[in-house]
Amino acid sequence: MPSPKENEVLLKVMACGICSSDIDRIFKTGTYHFPTIPGHEFSGQIVALGDNVDSSLLHQKVSVFPLLPCGKCAACDIGEYARCENYNYFGSRCDGGFAEYLAVPVWNLVFMPKGISYEAAALCEPAAVALHAINEARILPGDTVVIVGNGTIGLLATMWANICGAENVFLVGHSDKKIEFIRDMGFSNVISSERENVSDVIYRNTGRKKADVAMEFVGNSESITTTLDVVKKGGRVVLTGNPSGDILLKRDTYWKILRGELTIQGTWNSSFNANKNEWNTVIKYIANGMLPAEKLITHRFSLEEAADAFHMIKDKTEVSIKTIFEMK
């Protein structure tokens, strides 16, 4: 049982999502040191307070911004905490949310309105990552947008792109079984990169040969090649997929960056400061029903069933989108 220090609270974790990066940490790469409890997509209830913490916070429902900035570098000085030179991170560099209790700084708390469930609150982190990528894409009304990658963040980005007013949003996946599953969930314009030419599908549906914006949420050579293939000259590309290995591009693909004069933006986290807080936007849209993030939860497990949950995702024994741990 952790003890909250000054300016910290003790959080009883109520829900924690499993990210694809957690599967790599558990089965392949490990965390930054051992032992570490993974889990960075979590929510819970405040059950105890450290020194110098407002007593009104007790029993409140919160989600948690998982990045712990150093507060001393040039990036921290301007609130760009995702660029921090010496950050800590719940679930990879220090213990995270696959636990019953966790001590969390008050600064990292994101307070939830009554209408949001703990499960939906746990999805605020991937929803904020997706929103940050969408904001960096600078989508304009009337744009054609291609989202490459049909995992949780890719699906959330698809929702955000529609909210932003894109005229056409296409979602590109690889597995036919998962594509059918996603279509049954209500997503339209889903393309199989294995069976279809993505640019041909865009042209048949829009009369445009290429997309204004292309976004990648997988992190491998094939998906990045697809992303660069489908964007128009002068278009905007956002890369968010977390790679599990080296990325290799053919010369012809690289030339598309140069000769197409593409704008490429990398993203990996979300904005969380006084001037721009994408978590507040996420909460607003989940609360009013415009971002139905919770519908992406396909599987729920207890912590005692952790091995079953991890192996289901790793071995793909079932089609899943977001799998979460529920703590009672």
Image (cartoon, grey):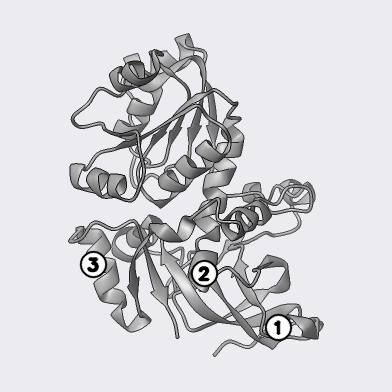
Residue occupied by mark 1: 5
Give the residue type at disc 1. Answer: Lys
Q: Where is residue 149 in the image (x, y as percent from the top left)?
A: 36, 40
| SS state under label 2 | strand
Position of 295 compared to 43: left or right? left
Residue occupied by mark 3: 311
**Quick check: can you spot residue 221?**
yes
Give the residue type at disc 3. Answer: His
Residue occupied by mark 2: 42
Q: Residue at position x 45%, y 15% from top?
A: 232
Mark 2 to mark 3 CA distance (whole Å): 20 Å
Of tags 1 and 2, which is closer to the observer? 2
Give the residue type at disc 2. Answer: Phe
Q: Any mark on residue 246, and which?
A: none
| Closer-to-camera residue (51/324) | 324
Quarter of the image containing the C terminus?
bottom left
Callout 3 environment at 10 Å: few (<14), some (14 to 19), or many (20+)? few
Picture layout, residue 124 above or below residue 101: above
**Quick check: can you spot residue 94?**
no
Q: Earlier in the sequence, mark 2 or mark 3?
A: 2
